[in-house]
Image (tube, rainbow, N blue to C red):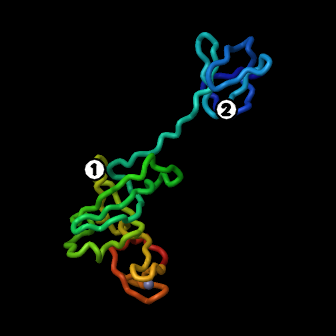
Amino acid sequence: MAVTRTGKIVVPGDFLGTTEEFTPGRGVYDDKGNIYASLTGRVRVSRQREIEVVPVVDTPPIPERGDVVVGRVEDIKESLVIMNIAYIVGHEDRNLAVSLPGVIHISNIKRGFVKDLKQEFGILDIVKARVIDAKALRLSTAEPKLGVIKAVCSSCRGVLRRKGNVLVCDECGRIELRKLSEDYYPV
Ligand SMILES: [Zn+2]
């Protein structure tokens, strides 16, 4: 029989060995001298032959400077856009520990002068942005690939479709402006 070693990943019910080989520790149970895993994790065998299963903790990713994040616009102030960061591009399968508020200052929206933030973003827009300051979670959309990737009509909540440099509502025909990402969809 293969000897259970430190580092092996096990699931509940996996046979780990007998009480003649090991002393049961945490994360295992002893059934008539047979030791089984009681949780999913990594086996650890101490020098005293105590066997335990340590749960594998999936540490959530933390945005770092330079990361591209995707989030939803929650509020638009006079010189700031506040968005809730949903995930880091490249870590789409892993949720963040908590929903993180990121801030885009008016000077980091795009190259050139921005007069009115409401012409660049709408509430509930889905935005792709780059982290320029990880501590304060300051973001920038001043690259062609960054900006709004999905939006709904501010009047009727219909889908906004890209037509050239503007967005047109599928439902009511309203035309809206955004700081668009090259990745905007639908087109
Ligand atoms: Zn509409």
Quadrant position of ligand 1: bottom left
Q: Left or right: 38 with respect to 176?
A: right
Q: Is residue 103 above or below residue 54?
A: below
**In terms of sequence position, does the residue under pointer 2 or pointer 1 come before the other?**
2
Q: Is residue 40 above or below residue 43?
A: below
Q: Give the residue type that dot 1 points to.
A: Ala
For residue 10, the mark is 2
Q: Give the residue type that dot 2 points to.
A: Val
Return the residue nearer the eye: 165 or 154.
Answer: 154
Question: CB of residue at label 2: within 8 Å of ligand 1?
Answer: no
Q: Tell me residue 12's x, y (percent).
A: 70, 33
View extreme (bottom): residue? 173
- Looking at the rendered image, the disc whose residue lies closer to the viewer, 2 or 1, is 1
Q: Tell me residue 89's x, y (percent).
A: 45, 56
- At a point 75% along the width and 17% down the height, the residue shown is 18
Return the residue nearer the eye: 36 or 185.
Answer: 36
For residue 136, the mark is 1
Q: Is residue 108 above or below residue 164?
A: above
Q: Left or right: 84 with respect to 11?
A: left
Q: Tell me residue 55's x, y (percent).
A: 58, 32
Residue 168: image quadrant is: bottom left
Q: Secondary structure at mark 1?
A: loop
